[in-house]
Image: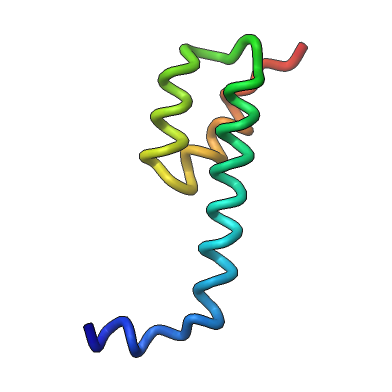
């Protein structure tokens, strides 16, 4: 528990908030998107379980441009 006291939360908290915003926006975008490159269920699992990189991969590769 002492390790948590040594963390500088003023630096970590904004990064965690940005990661949460990116994950939520990727999930909303994936759910609203009619077609994706690959199965939609796969992208949702990647976004949720491969936290930061899953959302970035979805925006770079997963979205199908009309």
Q: Is residue 46 left or right of residue 25?
A: left
Question: Where 24 falls versus 41 (above or below)?
Answer: below
Q: Is residue 16 left or right of residue 66?
A: left
Residue placed farthest to the right in the image? 66
Colour convention: rainbow
Question: Where 66 falls versus 15 (above or below)?
Answer: above
The quadrant of the picture occupied by the N terminus is bottom left
Q: Determine which quarter of the picture holds residue 65.
A: top right
Q: Determine which quarter of the picture holds residue 37.
A: top right
Taking depth in this image into account, of 57 and 44 the one nearest to the observer is: 44
Marks counted in the figure total 0
Q: Position of residue 26 (x, y in %)?
A: 59, 36
* Residue pictured at 43% horizontal, 46% vertical: 51
* Residue pictured at 53% horizontal, 39% vertical: 55
The quadrant of the picture occupied by the C terminus is top right
Q: Position of residue 19 (x, y in %)?
A: 54, 54
Question: Where 31 falls versus 35 (above or below)?
Answer: below
Q: Position of residue 52 (x, y in %)?
A: 48, 48
Q: Position of residue 46 (x, y in %)?
A: 42, 32
Residue placed farthest to the left in the image? 1
* Residue pictured at 59% horizontal, 69% vertical: 14
């Amino acid at each position: 528990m002492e390790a948590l006291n040594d963390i500088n939360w003023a630096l970590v908290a904004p990064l965690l908030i940005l990661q949460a915003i990116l994950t939520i926006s990727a999930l909303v975008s994936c759910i609203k998107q009619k077609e994706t490159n690959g199965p939609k269920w796969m992208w949702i699992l990647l976004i949720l379980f491969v936290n930061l990189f899953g959302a970035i991969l979805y925006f770079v590769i997963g979205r199908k441009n009309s």
